[in-house]
Amino acid sequence: MPYELPDPRNTTSLPTADEAYPYNKFAGTGETPSILPAGSATPFTNAAYPRLYVPWNHLTAGFPKDLRNDIAASPDKFLAGLPYGAGPKWYAESPRADLLLKEFLDGFDFPDKGTISLLPSRGKGREEGEKGRSQQEERLRQAMAALSSRVVWNFVPFNPKALAWVISAYQGNVVRNDQSLIAEALACLKVAVWRDIPLQILVKSITRARGKSGNPVELTVKMTQSWRLVYTETKNLDNDKGEVLLLIGEPITEDLDLHRALAAHIRRLRVRVNYQRLLNVDKIIGCDWCKNQDHPSHACPFPGIYSAARMVWPNDRRT
């Protein structure tokens, strides 16, 4: 009996993967706990800020291969520290940041802390800035460099299975902040995906590699069950607004190459909503500040953190 496609507009009985959805999670409850950490000079905040979700390949892009392999083998033994606004320019202006971070972490006092070892990432941007300097010149530069009095670090666990949830971004005349229109756009996207035979074949091959089998059409439908369209706005250098719909969904494979191939195929599909075409944006919209991919930089929810928490170093040195 042939598989009958469901109604793409009926989502009442479909699982939404809310438990797994990475952008719905928060780092705190927003309530002050009854028992605060003791034995540390570091102030404590339980403010409710979104957790970061940084794909494995993005998080380790600047790491040496041997370090990346060590982390992949034992991810629970490592923790990534991401400065707010991290990038080549930030590290060039803050060469002592890694050392100060270790000093900050050493200020925590709890029984099972163990030994903290700092393994700074040496991305291309940092290596290029250090070429041509002698060791003595580099030490002098680090010793004299000032660090902003307010530096925010986000700590992210390493997960080699974590791949990007953002599949594509769309613009066009039909894109606007209208929930009924967004629901219709998602339905049209699903239908285009469900009916694409080359995509069905790719989904079936990915599923077979995971030891599962089934009707390729049904497997393709299941792939889209966690999909959602998120409305956001971008801004150009002239502060002009650009309306964007982000297609976000749970990855169906842990293989980075297959994951990229699947996303690339979806981006190439021609999709129309109310006779108007959804235009794929070449660049995925993401935040340069916190590194989350579900919002642009100007809409980052983290800047307000400066008014809620400050890191206090031992001996009253602040950052």
Image (cartoon, rainbow, N blue to C red):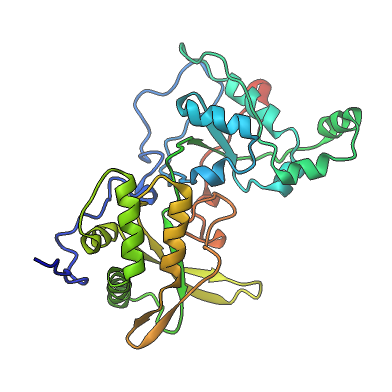
Residue 228 in picture, x, y percent from top left: 32, 62
Quadrant where the C terminus sits is top right
Query: 232 or 278: which is nearer to us?
Result: 278
* Location of residue 65 (image quadrant): top right
Residue 307 shows in this picture: no
Q: In the picture provided, is 123 more to the left or to the right than 220?
A: right
Identified at 40% across, 44% down, the residue is: 254
Q: Give the vertical position of 140 relative to 94 (above or below).
A: above
Instruction: Say if 33 sits above or below 242 in the image.
Output: above
Image coords of residue 234 (percent x, y): 53, 69
The residue most toward the top is 111
Q: Is residue 263 left or right of residue 2?
A: right
Residue at the spot x=28%, y=43% of the render?
211
Q: Residue at x 44, y 53 (%)?
A: 258
Residue 196 position in % (x across, y down): 32, 71
Left or right of 32? Residue 244 is right
Q: Is residue 5 left or right of residue 68?
A: left
How many numbered badges does the structure rendering display? 0
The residue at 35%/57% (across/down) is 249
Considering depth in this image, is 98 or 74 the residue closer to the camera?
Answer: 74
Rendered-image quadrant of the N terminus? bottom left
Asked if residue 292 shows in the view, the reply is yes
Q: Residue furthest bottom?
A: 275
The percent position of residue 214, horizontal first and vertical second, equals 20, 54
Q: Residue furthest left?
A: 1
